[in-house]
Image (spheres, helix red, strand yellow):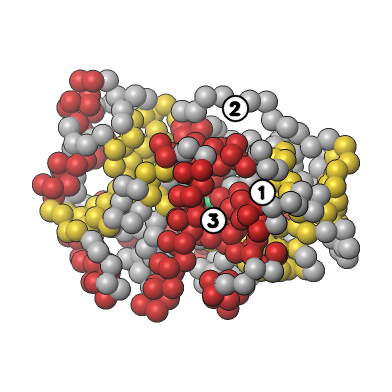
Amino acid sequence: MSMHQAVRTPADINMSGWYGLLPPPKAPEVLRGRHTADWVIVGAGFSGLAAARRLSQLVPGDRIVVIDAQRVGWGAAGRNSGFMIDLPHELGGENYGGSQDHDRKRIRMNRAAIEFSAAAADEYGLQRFFVRAGKFHGAATDHGLAVLREFENHLTGLDEPFERLDGQQLKTITGTDFFVGGTFTPGTVMAQPAGFIRGVAEGLSSRMQIFEKSAVISLQTGKLHTVKTAEGDIAAPRLILTVNGHLESFGFFNKRLLHVFTYASMTRPLSKSEQAALGGEPNWGLIPADPMGSTIRRIGDRIVVRNTFTYNPDMSTSEKQIAQIGAAHDRSFRARFPMLGEVPMEFRWGGHLCLSLNSAPAFGEVEERVFVAGCCNGLGTVQGTLYGMLAADLAAGADSSMLSDALDEPSPSKLYPRPVMAIGAPLRLWAMQRRAGREL
Ligand SMILES: Cc1cc2nc3c(=O)[nH]c(=O)nc-3n(C[C@H](O)[C@H](O)[C@H](O)COP(=O)(O)OP(=O)(O)OC[C@H]3O[C@@H](n4cnc5c(N)ncnc54)[C@H](O)[C@@H]3O)c2cc1C
């Protein structure tokens, strides 16, 4: 039995464009008074909702409660670029790949998570937010091209299909001649992340209670765990924590989680004449050859640019930081789309990524009947879903080879001492982003 006081709770600032494109949500149900349940899940992002959906399949009669500090889709789950990637996607590496054995296992697990999400999209009528479109990688330099060729060799070794594109073919798709070549891989789903995650929560709400704007301020674990918010509490024998980097705010995985923010800007709608000047196809998503470069998406009449990583150990960013990085987005946008002149950004935002030094997730049973799934190393739409599902399997006693594989994975390794991290982490990010050069 132990007490975990939250030393901080999430408070993401600036609405993401994805959230802003949706109709306003209905009023939230806030946790008030005393409640009991069979299961409490804290965190309603990709991990939490996957755990909730999986539990509802495994133990259909049980009372499940999900609780989030913010509106569903307001946090990182609705702030990301929406690439649900089936292939290896190692942000810390130079070309996304890892060892072949590791990557084969990763692909099998990622695909299982994508199919789990696809079933939710079908069940809840969310196909417009979940499109099996594949992803492009674009190289802006000869070095980038060499990196992509290495990536293609890796895919060949894994027996995974891809298509090689030259600069002209990429221009036909994107409208810009910024890219000298690229690679298309077919297995990625392109999501409208806030639309998808809100839709899943709405779909689940007929089977369980979902409380929003109800930050959990303490957890008392024991025979019955008690989850406390400012205005209420819930007692339940089983608890699943899917709060991503905020696991550390409750004292779990101390000094093992790396809190990084990344940022995006979305244009206002392009006029018909701007779209004609741009050319290309109306919907596509492109990942940079260098993992530290700019991700670009076109969604009909808007363009979204994501780049820049910052180290934010206090798990928050500021308006000032978002505005400064917005200037970098504008530079990247203008370099790629000079034909669009000064089209302004309508939305700018940042969001919290949780990474670990060894790219391992925070997963498992951390105390008796307290399960966690988090720290998905930049691919949380897929791996959050995966570890959320598997946390539910573990908690409900469902066995599978994937669960055994997940339990065999290492835990997040220890970070360097705080003063070393304070200097070393920003420096390393700066060096990696500098290496990206024109890909940024
Ligand atoms: C700009 C950007 C671009 C990205 N692009 C991609 C991409 O293209 N593809 C991809 O796979 N990933 C991407 N990511 C990463 C992805 O968004 C995350 O990995 C993913 O959201 C993690 O899912 P999660 O459910 O584990 O955590 P989260 O989405 O962070 O959800 C955790 C939830 O827990 C809640 N919570 C935390 N503490 C408490 C508390 N005390 N009480 C109650 N609730 C609490 C939070 O409010 C939050 O809603 C991107 C992220 C950003 C910011």
**Badge 1 element:** loop
Question: Cβ of disc 3 within 8 Å of ligand 1?
Answer: no
> Image check: 358 left or right of 208?
left
Q: What separation in Å lies between label 1 and label 2 (alpha carbons)?
A: 18 Å
Earlier sequence position, callout 1 versus callout 3:
1
Earlier sequence position, callout 3 versus callout 2:
2
Under mark 3, the amino acid is Thr
Residue occupied by mark 2 = 25
Question: Cβ of disc 1 within 8 Å of ligand 1?
Answer: yes
Q: Residue at x 21, y 40 (%)?
A: 174
Residue 201 can be seen, yes or no: yes
Residue occupied by mark 1 = 43
Q: Residue at x 18, y 25 (%)?
A: 276
Near mark 1 (Cα within 10 A), the count class, few <14, some 14-19 or many ≥20, is many
Expressed as whole percent of the image width and height from the top left, the position of residue 102 reads: 42, 76
Q: Looking at the picture, does residue 233 appear above or below residue 367?
A: above
Under mark 2, the amino acid is Pro
Residue occupied by mark 3 = 385
Q: Residue at x 13, y 47 (%)?
A: 169
Mark on residue 174?
none
Q: Quadrant of residue 361?
A: bottom right
- The residue furthest front is 61
Q: What separation in Å lies between label 3 and label 2 (alpha carbons)?
A: 23 Å
